[in-house]
Amino acid sequence: MKRVHKFNLIKNLLFLSFFYFLIIPNLFSQTQKTVGVIKNQNGNDDKGYVLLTPLTSKNTYLIDKCGKELKTWKSKYLSGLIAYLLPDGSLLRAGQISDTNYMGQGKGGILEKYSWDGQLLWSYKISNDSLGLHHDFYPMKNGNILAIAWHGIPASIAESKGRKSGTVYSSKLWSERVLEIKPKGTNDIEIVWQWSLIDHIVQNENILMPDYDNISSHPELVDINYKNSTNSDWVHINAIDYNEELDQIVLSCHHFGEIWVIDHSTTTAEAATHKGGKRNKGGDILYRWGNPRTYQKGGNEDQVFFGQHNAYWIPKLYKDGGSIMVFNNGLGRNPMVSSVEIITPPQSSPGVYGSNLPYGPSTQTWVYKDSIPTKFYSAVISGAQRLPNGNTLICSGVQGRIFEVGNKNSIVWEYINPIAGENEITDGQAAAGNSVFRALFYPDTFSAFKNKTLKPGNPLEKNPISYSCNSGYIDFSQPVPQTFFPENRAINISKSVLPYIEFDENIKPGNTGNIYIFENNNLVSTLPYNSSNLNFSNKRLTINIPVELMPKSKVSIKIDENCITDLSNNGIETIDSSK
């Protein structure tokens, strides 16, 4: 085969891999497992449990890695997106309040604390004309709670501080506030610290207004007119995390496409100024990353984060400890695909960040993306967490898909949330309405489980298809291509080199069907599933096309359903690259 012919084949192999997950619908039969545990293989961190709060449910569930229910906490409120298990075994959960205050995406409004046995111990509403709890919160070791709240600024006041006239969509500009609250009694709080974004803005619209200055000279401040947005919810913070050692807070700012780090060592009074705290910068931004054009130190091509969620510091003793992990949703990126990324902020000393602009690093420490990028995309919500064994737990939230990637980014555990609203999805049926904001892993050594009896119950899904965890191996998932050769699509490859696809698990010929090669829409070769021209070796399929193709031909490939399977006989679906 001529070199250019091999190149055409390789291009089509790459194309069909994208096509596989873009337009082929789910055709699972009743015997194909569709929800609950889909995969459980050696190498997953099975020494712990997963906490999930389905987006449209009033319940929070604790499951083991076999997908069995261990605990359920019931609330009268729909999910306010997130819940955390506390060291004493209690559950801190956000609920969604039904009122007319701040009716934006991510609305919560109430915090509730439940005992291990499900008794409501404490609750408090943060939903009024001034403040609205939303998206995320962080339970601190001292028992306090860091919470994100929308902070309503009347349009007239926002404009008096330099907000461009006519860009406040409603009567208020939704600014942001971080509150540290101390629960009191059963239904009260004390605010022990707070930070308000409106105290740290800059504008270059009107020289006669406060905070006027050159945006690029003040990366520690936030441009109140960034993008000239008319969205009242102009920042949309969707995640908060706290680093106790640094005494700093990281925030994920969805509409800005970046993360911010602020100082928590200030007093509330200092947090409203530009001085004070361990870094003597008051409540100004200490560090930001993801989109340098927000402070006019980059262009569109420099933006890295797109609609990101779940920025958090990886625990110090874990792999990449001390770095920041982010779920990069990819909303607005070209192409729109998701990834999980780790950055390691340059520091001259702990918590003191480099002054070179734009802020470093220039590249990420680690990036996970699917080998077929379009397979992994969650436009909103979602999160990721580094596990004690070095693996990464990823929640592709829109699909309710939770999976663990291990060595070489192979998927070693996969779970599809089977809860939609107050109903359980019947196994074998396609999942829908089962989104999850974020899933959290807790190792079995976590103090919440001390002296607790954790007896696995049934799977959460209705009528679960039979499976057993006794062997330590479950696989109901289809083989997924991981590597293509040559990856760079080079033309000048040796004639003796054959292209191959490497999957995430061992593969073999199926029991039916063919692989069809088309040239300019004409069928030129048919290779049956057991053809000697198809070489199956562990995880690799090598294809030797037995015909000579003309230069510059349009080559397409069709693969019949179940022509290729894994060792558990999970077959591929029909693939046709010509459509």
Image (cartoon, helix red, strand yellow):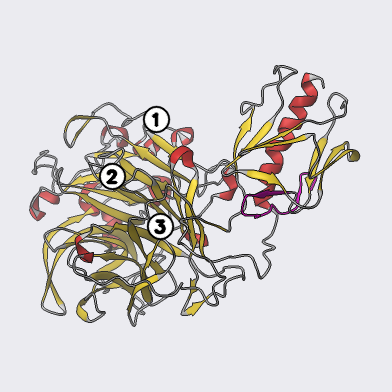
Residue 309 picture location, percent across and down: 39, 52
Q: Compared to 166, does 191 lie above or below?
A: below
Residue at screen point 42% across, 65% down: 105
Residue underneath mark 1? 363
Where's the N terminus, which quadrant?
top right
Q: Which residue in the structure is indicated by mark 2? A: 314
Q: Is residue 205 visible?
A: no
Tag 1, which secondary structure?
loop
Label 2 sits on what residue type? Ile
Q: Mark 1, residues whose alpha carbon is within 10 Å: few (<14), some, or many (≥20)?
A: few
Percent x, y of residue 549: 87, 27
Please report whichever mark, 1 or 2, sits nearer to the chain's N-terminal start. 2
Q: Are marks 1 and 3 in contact (CB under 8 Å)?
A: no
CA gap between label 3 and label 2 equals 42 Å
Q: Secondary structure at mark 2?
A: loop
- Occupied quadrant, residue 4: top right
Q: Which residues are magenta?
A: 564-579
Residue 567 falls within the magenta-colored stretch:
yes
Task: Determine which of the numbered discs, if any, sits on residue 166 in the image.
Answer: 3
Q: CA separation, marks 1 and 3? A: 38 Å
Q: Residue at x 47, y 37 (%)?
A: 408
559, above or below 114, in the image: above
Q: Position of residue 216 (x, y in %)?
A: 31, 33
Across and down, in percent, residue 498 comes to 72, 26
Judge from the rendering whether residue 55 lies leftward or rightward of residue 449; answer left or right. right
Q: Reading the chain from its start, which is encountered first: label 3 or label 2? A: 3
Please, what is the dominant secondary structure of the magenta stretch?
loop
Of the residues tagged 1 and 2, which is closer to the observer?
A: 2
